[in-house]
Image (cartoon, rainbow, N blue to C red):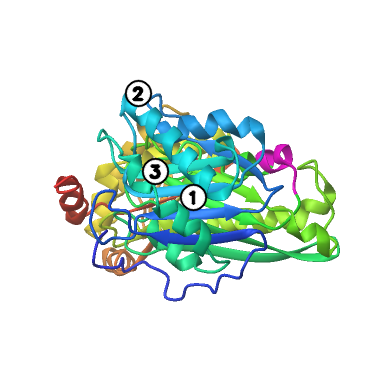
């Protein structure tokens, strides 16, 4: 973890309410570093449903495979997360480590191993010694409490500089239900499902198939619309848990994501995902600027997404932002290489609302001083108008600084 907090970090962190049926505990198990909190245990009440989306990497971690295999059970009693070791590219020993971790947690909680969900983050390729969980998880199972959301978010950090948390409350039937989320991620972020690790909890009574549909739909404009460096992690995991405790207070049991009673909940759920996703972009390794890329006038929304990602993942664009240079030539380059319909002579480009290029050339009203001042701000919007159709999308990223190289050059040392 970096000692310097990102200058883009939120100035105020929300008070996280308790969620009935969820207890949290953290500990230092010495997974990679001594004396650092590196294990999170979330215990979940009986009847908790679970949903998940995972990395599209063809080289997924052992915990990703474990969770995929056990989602079909639709029930969860525990979540175990460790930082410092990703348990990825660890072969048979990695699979044995997941089985042992789940067995230790199951014994501590009196549940089945297939009701234990796992996630790991950290260095790839090093075996995870799961025996370090023995005793630790038993203690956490006894001492876990309904609070400690901030501590839980800190326990899963690696190169993150601040814990990422979000919360929302909303009416569902006759009850007020709560949605709490946490995430970690600062590098190796180009999700094609979620961020490196993120977990959302609610006391709403939502069946697993409905929760799965809700989650899958929610990531499209949130976590899937964030990139830090264009690299998709082997460990990307987003899990959602619904304890159902609010049913006792009058919340209706929801079996379909299309249930009209779920509309307000869906908006709140997606807002939690969006808040967490933006915090990931704000904490990009070495980041000094939050960058929003908006593409409009594309032939389709999908084309707009691909062009926006081409811009957001361009090292040349990102280093120009770091240098506070409104270099529209690099944006033109990124549009042109995206492989989507574009017409140079219809293209317009703006930085923070100031149009710098129009119809294939520098804007006639271009003012270097005005644009340079705009580029000093901590939040930068790049808008590209293609003039071809109604397709639109937006993605979040950050600038690329020398600190990113320093962090990743020293990551394993």
Judge from the rendering whether residue 31 lies leftward or rightward of residue 359; answer left or right.
Answer: left
Q: Which mark is residue 344?
A: none
Q: Residue at x 35, y 59 (%)?
A: 283
Residue 41 visible? The answer is yes
Q: Looking at the rendering, in which quadrant would you find the N terminus?
A: bottom left
| Mark toward the start of the polypeptide (1 vs 3) | 3
Q: State the CA–CA distance, disc 1 to disc 3.
A: 11 Å
Q: Position of residue 86 (x, y in %)?
A: 34, 40
Q: Which residues are magenta?
A: 206-213
Judge from the rendering whether residue 305 lies leftward or rightward of residue 288; answer left or right.
Answer: right
The residue beneath circle 2 is 92
- Between 116 and 371, the residue placed more toward the observer is 116
Q: Position of residue 216 (x, y in %)?
A: 61, 39
Q: Relative to residue 338, is residue 189 depicted above or below?
A: below
| Mark toward the start of the polypeptide (3 vs 2) | 2
Q: Residue at x 30, y 41 (%)?
A: 314
The residue beneath circle 1 is 198
Judge from the rendering whether residue 369 lies leftward or rightward of residue 200; answer left or right.
Answer: left
Q: Which mark is residue 120?
A: 3
Q: State the CA–CA distance, disc 3 to disc 2.
A: 16 Å
Q: How many marks do you count on the picture? A: 3
């Amino acid at each position: 973890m970096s000692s310097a907090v990102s200058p883009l970090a939120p100035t105020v962190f929300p008070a996280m309410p308790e969620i009935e049926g969820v207890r949290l505990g953290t500990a230092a198990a010495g997974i990679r570093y001594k004396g650092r909190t590196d294990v999170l245990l979330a215990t979940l009440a009986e009847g908790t449903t679970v949903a998940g989306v995972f990395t599209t990497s063809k080289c997924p971690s052992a915990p990703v495979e474990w969770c995929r295999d056990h989602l079909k059970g639709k029930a969860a009693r525990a979540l175990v997360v460790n930082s410092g070791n990703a348990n990825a590219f660890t072969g048979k020993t990695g699979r044995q480590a997941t089985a042992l971790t789940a067995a230790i947690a199951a014994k501590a909680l009196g549940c089945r191993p297939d009701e234990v969900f796992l996630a790991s983050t950290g260095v790839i390729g090093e075996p995870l010694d799961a025996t370090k969980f023995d005793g630790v998880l038993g203690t956490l199972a006894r001492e876990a409490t309904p609070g400690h959301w901030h501590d839980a978010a800190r326990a899963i950090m690696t190169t993150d500089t601040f814990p990422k948390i979000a919360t929302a409350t909303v009416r569902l039937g006759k009850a007020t239900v709560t949605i709490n989320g946490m995430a970690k991620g600062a590098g190796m972020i180009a999700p094609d499902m979620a961020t490196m690790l993120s977990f959302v909890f609610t006391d709403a009574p939502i069946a697993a198939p409905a929760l799965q549909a809700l989650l899958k739909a929610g990531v499209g404009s949130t976590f899937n619309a964030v990139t830090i460096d264009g690299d998709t992690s082997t460990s990307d995991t987003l899990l959602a848990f619904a304890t159902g405790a609010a049913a006792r207070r009058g919340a209706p049991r929801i079996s379909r994501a299309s249930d009209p009673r779920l509309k307000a909940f869906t908006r709140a759920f997606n807002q939690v995902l969006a808040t967490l996703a933006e915090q990931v972009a704000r904490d990009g390794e070495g980041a000094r600027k939050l960058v929003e890329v908006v593409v409009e006038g594309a032939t389709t929304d999908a084309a707009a997404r691909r062009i926006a990602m081409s811009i957001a993942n361009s090292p040349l664009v990102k280093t120009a932002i770091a240098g506070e240079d409104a270099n529209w030539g690099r944006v033109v380059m990124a549009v042109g290489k995206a492989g989507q319909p574009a017409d140079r002579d219809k293209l317009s480009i703006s930085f923070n609302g100031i149009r710098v290029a129009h119809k294939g050339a520098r804007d006639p009203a271009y003012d270097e001083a005005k644009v340079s001042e705009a580029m000093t701000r901590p939040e930068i919007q790049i808008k590209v108008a293609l003039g071809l159709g109604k397709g639109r999308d937006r993605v979040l990223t950050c600038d690329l600084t020398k600190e990113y190289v320093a962090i990743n050059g020293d990551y394993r040392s």
